[in-house]
Structures are given as structure tokens and as C-alpha cells.
Amino acid sequence: MTVVTKTVNLLITRLQSLERGWEDGMAVLAWLLIPLLTAIGAGLWGVWANRTRTVRGDGPELDGYARFREAMERSTSRT
């Protein structure tokens, strides 16, 4: 049997046992919600992390570097 089937069977048997009360059944539901919410959160984070971003070219960086080199050449030629 798979883990999901075992978990569902455990949940059903715990909820059907009325001699222990509904508190145990609610505790099982609470413990099942923790991994479910974690999986949903991880899926949402994965979608957000893998989103396509607009690609910015190297133009602004190369222009800035060219201005830096020109400024450095100008400052050394004056001495």
C-alpha cells in the first residue's frame, strides 16, 4: 500500500473510533494539514522562483565600464 492509502486508512479508523472522542480525530487532521500546507507553500515558492524575468542586456554595464575606463585614462594622463 502507498503512504497516501495508509494515511487515509489511519484517518478513517481514527475518526470512526468514537470511544476516544473527536479530539483525536481533530489532532490527526491537524497533523495532516501541516505537510499539506507545507507542500502548497513549497509549490507556490517554486512557481515564484522559476518565473521568467525580463532579460536586460549588457549594454548599461558595458557603457558604465567604458565611462570608467575613460575617466581613469584622463586622470592618469594629467600627471
Image (cartoon, grey):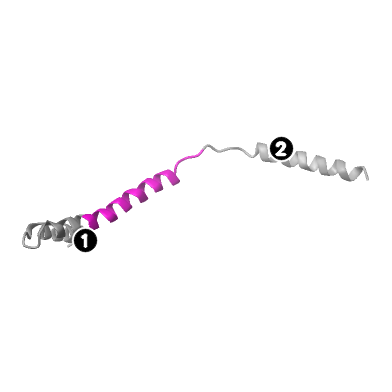
User: If the image is split into quadrants, where does the C terminus sit?
Assistant: top right
Residue type pointed to by label 1: Val
User: If the image is split into quadrants, where does the N terminus sit?
Assistant: bottom left
Please indicate whether residue 2 sits to the left or right of residue 40 in the image.
left
Give the labeled residue for mark 1.
Answer: 3
Residue type pointed to by label 2: Asp
Q: Main secondary structure of the magenta part?
A: helix
What's the mark number on residue 13? none
Which sits in the foreground, 17 or 44? 17
Q: What secondary structure is marked by label 1?
A: helix
Which sits in the foreground, 28 or 20? 20
Q: Is residue 6 visible?
A: yes
Q: What secondary structure is marked by label 2?
A: helix
Highlighted magenta segment, given as a residue range? 30-53
Residue 53: percent from the left, percent from the top? 50, 39
Residue 24: percent from the left, percent from the top? 15, 60
Give the labeled residue for mark 2.
Answer: 63
Please indicate whether residue 63 sits to the left or right of residue 55 in the image.
right
Which sits in the foreground, 7 or 51? 7
